[in-house]
Image (cartoon, helix red, strand yellow):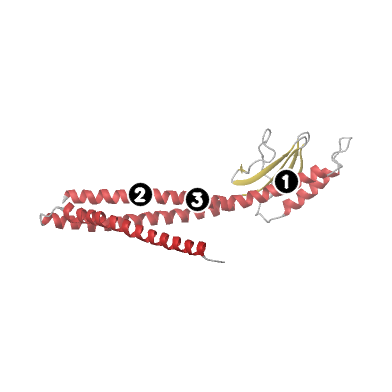
Amino acid sequence: MSRTRSLRVQLTATFVAVGAMLVAAGYGGAAWLLHRAVWSPLDAALRAEATALALIRETDDAGEASDGERGEGIDDMAVAAARLGAKRNLGAGKFVTITSAAEGVIASSGQPPTHIPSTDGAPITERARFIPDGAQLYRAVTHRIPGFGSITVGVQADSYVRLLHGALTVLGAGALSMLGAIGLLAWAITTRATKEIDALTTMNIPPERMLVLPRLAAITIMMPVLAIIANLSLSGKGGDDCLGYTAIATRKP
């Protein structure tokens, strides 16, 4: 009896281990999709607004005045930044900051974080990043303008993080429930199998002869039969096709 119990535990552990790997792979893929679903639209919107502000600077012919004062381009960017910072389409805590390499922050709108890390040496369009500010967390995109400075557009990410954590919690609970169901099902199946083995052992019947040999015999007999049936069906179909092609080729116009 101890051998069958050990076999039951081993089989159950094997099924649970395989199920755990599959569930973990599914959880990882679903979590990645959730991250993409939450952050990709937000990053694309922030990047689009930062690029739009940069285009105002790049396409304005006035630029900076020759006497060092701010030109019309800077004023246009400040007005556009104020309008974008007032919008709440991406959530609360939105901000826009325009920084000049020579003058520092020249325009700011919304609720920017206390400190925005420098992006010196970063590519022109930087990837989205998190900016912690005390108990708050921001998601921001910085667009650098060569020879001028940078534009940073961001929004508070606390609501997005809570949404993502809630979805991941529900997903994790579902994965654990599925793994538990796999474990119970595996235990039930292996219990039934080991009971059959115990019954055969009690009657002095080798379990291998009653459980394994019939299946091997069925496989040994049926595989050639299935191969013959498949060959006959394919040859019949091929013969019909050949007859059809011959009839078409010999048909008189």
Question: Which amino acid does the dot numbered 3 rest on?
Answer: Ala
Up the image or down, 235 lies above or below 72; here it is: below
The location of residue 122, given as percent across then percent down, is 67, 35
Q: Which residue is mark 1?
A: 51
The percent position of residue 173, horizontal first and vertical second, equals: 43, 55
Residue at horizontal 70 percent and vertical 49 percent from the top:
48
Q: Residue at x 60, y 50 (%)?
A: 40
Give the residue at mark 2. 18
243 sits to left or right of 35: left
Tell whether 208 sits left or right of 34.
left
* Sequence-wise first label, 1 or 3: 3
Reading the image, the residue beneath label 3 is 31
Spot occupied by residue 124 in the image (x, y as percentages of width and height): 70, 38
C-alpha span from label 1 to label 2 = 48 Å
Mark 3 or mark 2: which comes first in sequence? Answer: 2
* Residue occupying image coordinates x 50% and y 50%: 31
State the mark number for residue 93: none
Q: Neighbour class for label 1 at 10 Å: few (<14), some, many (≥20)?
A: many
Depth-wise, is mark 1 or mark 2 nearer the camera? Answer: 2
Considering the numbered disc 2 on the image, is that residue within a helix, a strand or a loop?
A: helix
Report, in whole angstroms, how far the alpha carbon at label 3 lies from the one at label 2: 20 Å
Residue 50 appearing in the image: yes
Q: Three-letter amino acid code at disc 1?
A: Thr
Q: CA distance from mark 1 to mark 3?
A: 29 Å
Quarter holding the C terminus? Answer: bottom right
Q: Secondary structure at mark 3?
A: helix
- Answer whether labels 3 and 2 touch (C-beta < 8 Å): no
Q: Is residue 184 visible?
A: no
- Residue type marked 2: Val
